[in-house]
Image (spheres, rainbow, N blue to C red):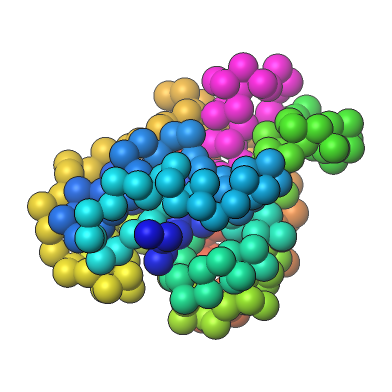
Amino acid sequence: MLPNFLIIGAARCGTTTVYRQLQVHPDVYLPADKRPEPHFFFKDQEFRRGLTYYEERYFANWRGEHAVGEASTSYVFGPHVPVRVRAALPSAKFICLLRNPVDRAFSSYWHTRRAGLETLCFEEAIAQEQSRKQQIAGTELGEIAPFAYVERGFYYRQLVHWLQQFDRPAIKIVVFEDFLQTPDQVLSEIARFIGIAPEWPRLALQAENKSVPADTDMSSEMRMRLCEVFRDDIEALETLLGRSLRDWLKPRGGQC
């Protein structure tokens, strides 16, 4: 059995929380452990192992559930991924969670720092993002792009690659802030999207995999700078989604 839906990202956008909630649905099969994420269609070394390996490694315990999936948050980020997925899973559906890219960058920075890979302060890490990308290009570390705090937040340019391979109805885009405000409604929408009953006994909602230390935020100046970096991409995303994302461009403070 191969998956008929994928949670494709984005990283640090609530994918783990959604995964845990779907995992307890009686008609959903997801691998027991979300981490490490499969990244099968993203990592060259994994992809070369073939679909039989992928099926046996992650879906051997399938017991007839209607919705079968996995979550790899780099899928939306990898421009080569949609072509690979199209060839292997042409009828699949895709769930993509997106959050304010400024907050996402800050959360990703702290996640990488907690993992022991990041030693720079946030401002310096942002300043050196492109030079570090060049330094690790062609390496295993370069493939996973741990320092792509800003680059991973250009959601529209990433989604374009998916829309070149799949029709828009195949992709359910969830705004993370909507999920925080109306989690039951969003989970019911996701369930209908993947063809399962929209009501089931859910887990108590709690933040999963939180990384930003309490009482920690970026400077107002840095937030304003990043808002401008993302402005064009956010405005293009607004057009794609047919909704306002003006709150993402407000130079506010607050926890990420």
Relative placement, left or right, of 223 versus 206 is right
Q: Is residue 58 visible?
A: yes
- Residue furthest left as drawn: 201
> Is residue 252 among the parts visible in the rendering?
no
Please indicate whether residue 238 sits to the left or right of residue 256 in the image.
right
- Furthest toward the front, the residue is 52
Q: Which residue is drawn at the image coordinates 27% and 73% (left, top)?
A: 195
Quadrant for residue 57, please give it.
top left
Percent from the top left, x then y, of residue 79?
A: 71, 60
Up the image or down, 18 lies above or below 217; here it is below
Q: Position of residue 56 (x, y in %)?
A: 43, 46
Task: Return the x and y of residue 9 as percentages of the image width and height.
Answer: 52, 53
Viewer-side residue, 254 vs 201: 201
Please tell me which residue is depicted at 57% across the width and 21% down the height of the picture. 115
Residue shown at the point (22%, 69%) measured from the top left:
196
Residue 1 within the segment the image draws in magenta: no
- With respect to residue 24, does 76 lie above or below? below
Q: Position of residue 134 (x, y in %)?
A: 89, 37
Task: Kindly identify the residue that appears in the image at 22 percent across and 54 percent down.
Answer: 63
Magenta highlight range: 101-122
Count how many numbered circles sit on residues in the image: 0
**Residue 112 falls within the magenta-colored stretch:** yes
User: Left or right: 210 with respect to 201?
Assistant: right
In terms of depth relative to the viewer, which is nearer, 157 or 81? 81
Image quadrant containing the N terminus:
bottom left
Dominant SS type (magenta): helix
Q: Nearer the viewer, residue 216 or 194?
A: 194
Position of residue 234 in the picture relative to residue 103 (left or right): right
